[in-house]
Image (tube, rainbow, N blue to C red):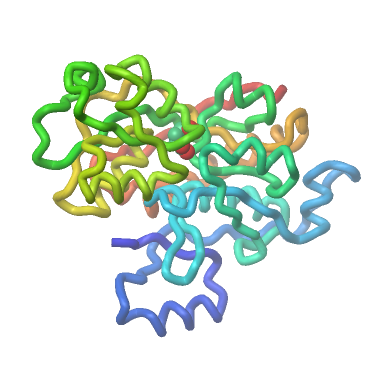
Amino acid sequence: MRKFRTALLTGSVVAALTLTACGGDTSTEGAEAPSPETETSFEAGTTMAELSEAGTITVGTKFDQPGFGLVNLENQPEGFDVEIAEYIAAQLGIAADAIEWVEAPSAQREELIQNGTVDMVVATYTINDTRKERITFAGPYYVAGQQIMVNADDTTITGPEDLAANPDVKICSVTGSTPAENIREYLAGPDQLVTFEVYDDCVAAMQNGQVQAMTTDNVILTGYVAENEGEFKLVGEQFTDEPYGIGIEKGDTAFCEFINESLQQAADEGYYEEAWASTVGQYEGTETPALPEPDPCV
Ligand code: GLU
């Protein structure tokens, strides 16, 4: 079930959707694509002026996370993170089809920002102090929490506290993610944790029996539960807070403030809520959030 809308519906995208309509569900319900601002004016030398002038922005996001960033059959990422990035781009006068998308696996995000490969990262990216040593975060625009996913018929693991008592249960997460670090204190030993570069590989390892559990943010796991009907379930309560920020070059306070203002405007216009409803909000068990208060840009 991939019901999320694609990027701005240009003629060619509509044609592509029509052509592939028999190959699967290609409905495009959801938030109206944001119209790019036509009258932008930014102070010379700012990141906003540069991007607006260039008419394009490079955004790092996930390519394998249903509901947040998942590449569709037309090779376009879609999901809540994508919608948020599209809105910010529109405030810079950049249309959705002029965005360049780069896959940003968890462990590579700071590096992609620091080496200038991307202008910003919108990728289920938890704000924390370690990461803030290398980059600046705008936001948060959502607060998730870590949870555990097991096979639908599993009765052994009911939460993180059951892991140490069941050392044969392997739990999977992603290198460079906060959940991979947070889970360590609950394990019988370091070998109980299996890590891959992206979450898709954990899902595959669940399916072929190499691991019996997976951990990351609840809303990400909810997507895998929904997209693999009857196979998996979430257990226990969320046991961390994961505030999602937008990663940008360290110290770019003006861009950070611009992003925070854009997020507030998205909420005021109802775009934020619609973007949620048309993406991750379609999954059972998710609740429409209110935009959190922004952290100060420092
Ligand atoms: N929000 C967590 C993090 O930033 C987990 C999700 C992810 O790996 O993107 O590490």
Residue plotted at (63% across, 42% down): 262
Q: Determine whether 86 is above or below 7 in the image.
A: above
Find residue 106 and report its horizontal and vertical position in percent. 51, 39
Q: Determine whether 72 is above or below 225 in the image.
A: below
Residue closest to the far right: 44
Is there any visible trace of residue 291 in the rendered image? no
Frontmost residue, 4 versus 74: 74
Residue plotted at (25% across, 50% down): 226
Q: Quadrant of residue 296?
A: top right
Q: Determine whether 86 is above or below 206 in the image.
A: below
Frontmost residue, 91 versus 206: 206
Q: Quadrant of residue 196?
A: top left
Find residue 238 and report its horizontal and vertical position in percent. 30, 24
Frontmost residue, 38 versus 72: 72
Q: Is residue 163 left or right of residue 273?
A: left
Find residue 274 and report its horizontal and vertical position in percent. 43, 50
Q: Quadrant of the C terminus?
A: top right
Is there any visible trace of residue 172 in the rendered image? yes
Q: How many marks?
A: 0
Residue plotted at (40% across, 21% down): 182
Q: Is residue 181 left or right of residue 105?
A: left
Find residue 48 and report its horizontal and vertical position in percent. 78, 46
Q: Quadrant of the N terminus?
A: bottom left
